[in-house]
Each structure stands twice: as structure tokens, then as C-alpha cells.
Amino acid sequence: MESTMPDLDLKDIQGLIVRGYGKLEVACYILLEIQDGEATRRWLVTLADQITSAETRPTHTSLNVAFTNASLVALGLDAETLATFPNEFTEGMTSERRRIILGDHGENAPGKWVWGGPETPPVHILLMLFAVDEPTLERFSESVSHGFSSGGVTQIGETLTSTLLRDAQTGYSKEHFGFNDAISQPLIEGIGKSGSPANTVKAGEFILGYPNEYDLLTERPTVRAQRDPQGLLPEHPSESGAHDIGSNGSYLVFRQLYQDVGRFWQFLDDVTRDANGNSDPEAQVRLAAKMVGRWPSGAPLVRTAEHDNPELGLENDFGYRDMDSLGHRCPLGAHIRRTNPRDALDPHLGPQKTLAINNRHRILRRGRAYGQPVSASMRIEDIMHADTSGDRGLHFICFNANISRQFEFVQQTWINNPKFAGLYEDTDPLIGDRASREIRQPSVFTEQAMPVRRRVTNLPQVVDVRGGAYFFMPGIRAVRYLGSLKPAPHDIPLPPDAGRMP
Amino acid sequence: MTHQVALTVLAKIKPGETENLKDLLRIVGADVEKNEIFPFVQLSSVHFARFVILDEAKNVHNQSIRPSLVFASNVDAPLGDHLTELVTHTGEGLDRIYSHCEGYPGPGQRTPSSRLNYLRAHMVPSQAFYVNTLGRTLEQVHQEAKLRDSLEGILDRQQAEHDWSGWDARRVRAAIQGFIKEQPDLRWAERPAAGLTFGWRLKERIRFFLTLLVLLVLIPVFLLVLPIWLALLRYHEKKDAAEESHLQLSSQTRGTLALHEDHLVQNQFSAVGNVKPGWFRALTVRGLLWALNFGFRHIFNRGILTGVDTIHFAQWIMIDEGQRILFLSNYDGSLESYMDDFINKVARGLNAVFSNGVGYPKTNWLVLEGANDEQAFKAFLYKHQIPTQAWYTAYGWLTARNIDNNAKVRAGLYGEKEEQDAAMWLQRL
């Protein structure tokens, strides 16, 4: 089944899916709860006109919007249509089954979340605002939130803000522990710049309605034609009598991840002290780099195993199989080797086949850091010794067409799997599950080496999940359709938390 | 030492007793190792075992198939020893469980031998049985896991005191050997694993070649039949494709089934489905399962099945006079990754067998398409998966890959090694 490269309907696709708005340096995320479905529908009709599509490259402001299953219920989408959404979206991130898959227990248990958990108000709509600078964002968010009360929505908690962390010298994006971040992104076939085929993924992996890496169309929700009398949605290309509410949409995974910067560097300090009990900053950075798989500059260990090399800071065109099959350079369980194993995923298969399988589990990351950095300079030496009080971390956001096969798979089979790559008791050294009951010590980090491995045990948990939800980011036409719904009386289900798992 | 065998016992449940039996098995399943009814730890040769209830179902002619209870275990041979343990060590548990089934000896007549007769009378053969690594006994798996843990402990302690980074591999290995020698409970590691006996391997080898010879002789017959079979196959595939609707993954709600899977390390899978009606499918599926079993028994018995190294044991069992197939497996990792392995690595083999089942995604030439329709295939598996009431594993913290690595650690611990080989052996730690 050969498929030609599809023409993407950029006018209908929301912009954040195809670009991260790097020029729009500030962003905020607003979580909304629907109080009055009818008012919200009216509000959505006007909001739809403000959504930034993939067609434009915004230079000033940008707005995108996504919906939880509970919001679709509250907006009056009929049960028959709701049943065509995938189970993981319908259940939501905090269902019993999803918690098992995601490893959300212990410190990460949804009961402790500040939003999206069972103890906090139901999350319905996610508004994502981006702007070129703080004053612009402030004005923009004020004008948007102006419509909330007449739009029948209330804001949940505080606005989630973001911070752009930059390397003072190179200007590259950083995360709070002090490493360059957001280097490896799959390229979407047919959009923007082209790159290595190994890192180019079919649009259907991220946008519904286009062929995926199996050369198939990922299942997507549909609406019975009678339920779309105004014909706002296109006809479904293969199912007769159905209209296409899914095409040009995507599933958005949001996780607020708190980073305990102090605990991270304290642990590294404790386990790398020299024979006299003195701190060894070089050894700390070295071990941290082994855990990440890249040096603070972003340079991959596969390319430069012994010391950092900022010239390789954006290097992303590499594999593991030929240079490092044993993990002597980049450990088998390092964060970047787990989250994207590249050609090392399955040594039994050829590199091409391995990469093809690997690319069925990619996600498109669009998150941003939040909270003040522990050191404005973002230099590792300063971060190590800084005062680390305060709330900071990552608003992790990713897009995928199939939450089970992509985001959840990466989380369960790669990040939290102690048996990844033939290991025994290791989970991801940065974000791995430390509270599993099934593994005796799920907190080992093994550094493969000559003549024999070294390992550190009792890794602390340095990243906590503080909130999260699964959203559907519809195409812009589908947002208009949601605004146009005229539910029959028996279709209106409310109360507002309907659809949430108990 | 010994090879591995599968025991499968299938008994019809008495009318109206299914729910009572489920309640009982729920107690067993809640603490499968040490529950008071049927404590699996008392069975010394069991790698994996399960109780599965097949609920009342309809066959392809819409006739009712009565509910039954399946007990399935994967054990070290000889089977007789396992059966003896079952009827003695867990005899009272068998009584409590099978008193809900038809034909079980009455309360006054329950003795080890009457239980044994009952089990033997209800045993059903596996048409195909996959063993990850033939000849690796339960004792060996446990011993070698312990050895590996000891070695890692030694390394941790030694490395905390000295820096070994300048040492050559042979020196490190010699140091490790020295520490292990000091542990009397690890003396067994000085001998190689027993493995399969020469006599058994010889017998298997002879069987393999004789079978090949027979197949060779039959080639003219195959060639004669092949065009007819292919024509029939294409006819059936077209007919089936027209009849079947596309399965939607979103419509397969999983309910409580899902909560009993996705353990972190190992999981089980039980599924049952109807074979498509007619003699053609019945014959085809039997032929394929025979071929599959031949491959499992003689070729794919050393840890890896065309790229899949995560399956410990798997069984295909034809039940109800060949009307249905029961599939049971014990595998590593998440269900999602297991299904992806099916699709990415063994789709053709699965298509060949499962395409004879009702509702399977459309195939072409028996092995093409089918599982390649990713979501329809997953929906098919979800649709046919059934709850396993009680599941036991004797080494739930080990993957097949761990077990294989442990065996190689043990195999390479002693004996002369060149520097290069010693270095590669150390990489297993």
C-alpha cells in the first residue's frame, strides 16, 4: 500500500501541532470548567475565529484550544459520537487503568495533583495563549478571559504560566536541571524542513485523517450525517453517512511535571564524592550526563563520551547500534535512549526495520518550562549550588494520533520499564517510576563500562506529576461544529463532572 | 535434565455453578501463591499455571456451548510427577474447585487416584506448544537468578571500596570467581546446567529428520493438492472479506479485564474464538498448527521466535470438537507492546493460524494483511480475550531476556577465557 504524501489541510489544523511558536517567547495555559453548555457553545463560535491555524506563522500572538472528554459531554455531543473516541481519551488520564499504565502512584498519584485529579474541579477546556512578550501576553489573555463569564466557563486555579530558559551563550532552550532540551523532535512528513529519513514521521502519527506509519488511517471519531445538518464538517471519505469530526485533529497530552532541582544535584553530589569526602563537580556533571544521555550543552554522549562539546549542542543525527551497542558511551537506560531508542530498539532486527518500529512510538513535544530558574545564568556550576526553593518544572505537552501506541507506550514500555533493553531494575533515571510494588528496587541506574558496569542505587524521585489530562485538539471546523450543537433534551447529560471516572 | 510440557485439563461446569466457581477462584486469584484453597507454591515443577473459565458461548451455528473450566500449566517433565503433586499436595483444593464440574468423584470417593483418573480423563492436547528455551528447568531459573543477584551484590560492595576501572577483564573475573567460591550455597554454579539429556536430544533429532523425510516423500502429493487448496483458500478469503465488518478499537470496552493485566514485568493472555465453519478451515487450521508445533519443537526452542524474545510459553488448543481455539500465553511487558510485537514481527505466522478464526481482519494468501491492519487486529484480540481467574508465575520478576542472560552468566562464570571473551562476559552484569 504505497501512499503519496498527503496535502495537509493547514487552514483547518491548529497551529501548535505543526510549530512550537519559538518566536513567541511567552505562553500561558488556562484550564476552564463549563458551567453552562449553551453559553459555551455560543462562545466557541466566536473563539473559533481567533484560533491560529497551521497556515499562518504568527509573529505577535497565537491561540489554540483543546477539549477533554468531559467537556464534549458538557457541550452536548451525543453518546453515539462520543463512543467513537478512543478509550484512553474517554476514560481520561486518571482512570484506574490509565494509572497502572502511566505508573501514576506514590508521589505521582492523581489524588495529590493540583489539577486534573479526582479531588480537583473537572477540567474541560484548555486554552493555550502565546505572545511575543509579557505585556502582549497580558493584554491578550485579558481580552480572551473577558469572554469567560458570558461564555459560561470558569477558570480552574491559577493560569499556568511558562518561562523560557535559555543558555546564556548559545541561546538554546534549557530545562531546569540545566540541560539543553527540545533538541530531538520528529519531523512531520510533508511539512516544513526536511531532515534525515530516520527522524521523519508520517503526518498521520500526529494528525488524524492522514496515513500513519502503518500506512493506515488511525481510527478517528465520526458524526452521523444527520447530526450535522449545517454541513460544518466534511463528509467522511470512507464511511458513508458519516461526517468527519476527527480529521485535522490530534490528541494532546498535558502533564505538569515538577522538577526538584536541589534533590537532583544533591544526590549527584552525594554519590560522586571523592575518597576524602569532598565534592567533585566534574564527576557530578559526568554522572548527570550519563543519566540524560547528553551533556549540559546538548551534545550527545554517543558523539562525545568523555567531555562536553557545545559545538554538538544541537546534534540529533545519530544512532546507537554501530557506535555504542553496549552502552559504554550512552548508557542503555539513559533518558534519551529510553524515550527514543532509535536504531538500538531491537538488536535482533535490521536497523531499517528497527527504525520503522521505533517511529511508530514517537510523540511531538510542545511543552514549555515553568517557574523561575534556580539560577538566571543557567550555568551548571551555578545551578548546582543555588537556592532551590520554589515551584518549577515542565508543562509537558505532546501530540499524538494514538495515545496508547504513542505517549502511553513510551511511558510504560520504555520509561517505566525496569526491563528495558535487557536491564533488570532500572527505570528512567530522571522521570522513571520509583514507587512500583512489583520490582524490588526500581531505582537503580546502571552505567555500562569496561571492565564492568558501575551502578548507583536508591535514585531519588526528582520529578513529580502535579497535574494532567488527555485532550482532543480538534480541527478548526470541528470547533465550529461543537459550537453549533443543538442537543435534544435527552442528549443533555450534565452535571458538569459527567464522564469523569470515579 | 528435562524438557518442558504443558498440561491442560478441560471440564464442563455443572449447570448454574459458574458464578460459584468464579467466586471460589477469585479467592485463589487474590493470593495465588499461598491462598488456602489452591496454593500454587506447593507445586514444585510449575513455571506458569492458570485457571480460566470459558463462559457459555455460541458456536458458528448459533448453538450454545456450555461453560467449562480450564486448568493449564507449563511444567518440567515428567508430567506424571506434576499430576501426582496436584492430586496430593493440592488435592483438597482440586476437590473444592472441581466439585463444581461435571463427573468429579463424589465426596466419599475422593482419593489421590480417583482425582488422578479424573484429571487424566479430562486432559486435552495442545495442538501447538511454544517453549522459550527447551530444557531450562524451574530450579535452574531460580538458581541462576540467585547467582546473578549475588554477583551484582559483590560488584556493588567491591566497587564501593576499590576502583576497578584500570583492571583488565580477566582480573575482574578472577576476583569475582574468588568471591563466589567462598559461598557454599553457590557451589552448584561450578558445574554447567544439566540441560537436555543426550538420549532425549537424539530421539528428538531422529523424529525431526524422519518427519522431514516423510514430508519430502509427500512433496508430489502436496504439489498436486496445492493448486486446489490455494483456489479454495482464495474463494474462502473473498467470501469472508465480504461478510465481515471492520472492527473498531474504540468499541472494545475492556472493563475489569484490563485491570488484571499490565503488570510491570510479566503478563498472561487468554483468548478463545470460533473457527470458521466448514471442513476447509478445520483442516487448514489443524495443518498449520501441526506445522507451527513442528517449528516450535525442533527449531524455535532457544529463546527467540523470529525476533520476539518476550514469550515464555504459549499454547494453541482446539476445543469443543474443533469448533473453537483456545490460546494461552505468558509473556513479558505490556499488552500494547505484546500486540505490537505480533504485528511488527510475527504477523504472517499469526495470520496463517488466526485467519481461520471468525472475525479476524481480512487476509490475503493466508499470511498477508490481517494483523497488519493494526487497530482492527488489536480490536480482534481485545474482543476475544477472556479473564483469567487465577494466574501463577514462579518467577514474576524475571523476563525471558533476564533468564537467558542469567543462564549465560552462569555458563561463563568458570573455565578459561581469553581477555576478549572475559570482557564480553562481564558485560552481562
Image (cartoon, helix red, strand yellow):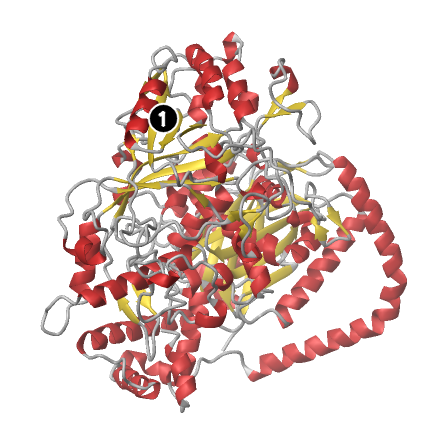
Graded by Cα atoms within 10 Å as few (under 14), some (14 to 19) or many (20 or more), the crowding at tag 1 reads: many
Q: How many numbered discs sit on the rendered protein?
A: 1
Please provide percent x and percent y for residue A171: 32, 50
Please provide percent x and percent y for residue B257: 48, 40
Mark 1 secondary-structure assignment = loop
Vertical placement of residue A176 versus A448, above or below: above
Nearer to the camera, A249 or B360: A249
Q: Amino acid at mark 1?
A: Val
Q: Chain of mark 1?
A: A
Q: Residue B147's image quarter?
A: bottom left
Vertical placement of residue B225 versus A132, above or below: below
Q: Residue A336's image quarter?
A: bottom left
Nearer to the camera, B191 or A389: A389
Residue at (68, 40) in percent of width and height: B359
Nearer to the camera, B20 or A68: A68
Please provide percent x and percent y for residue A454: 28, 71
The answer, for residue B150, to whether it is visible in the render is yes
Residue, disc 1: A123
Q: Residue A277's image quarter?
A: bottom left
Please provide percent x and percent y for residue B149: 31, 70
Vertical placement of residue A35 versus A23, above or below: above
Residue at (71, 46) in percent of width and height: B275
The answer, for residue B7, to whether it is visible in the render is no
Task: Name the outermost residue toward the top.
Answer: A489
Q: Quadrant of the C terminus of chain A?
A: top left
Q: Is residue A134 left or right of residue B102?
A: left
Q: Is residue B396 left or right of residue A378?
A: right
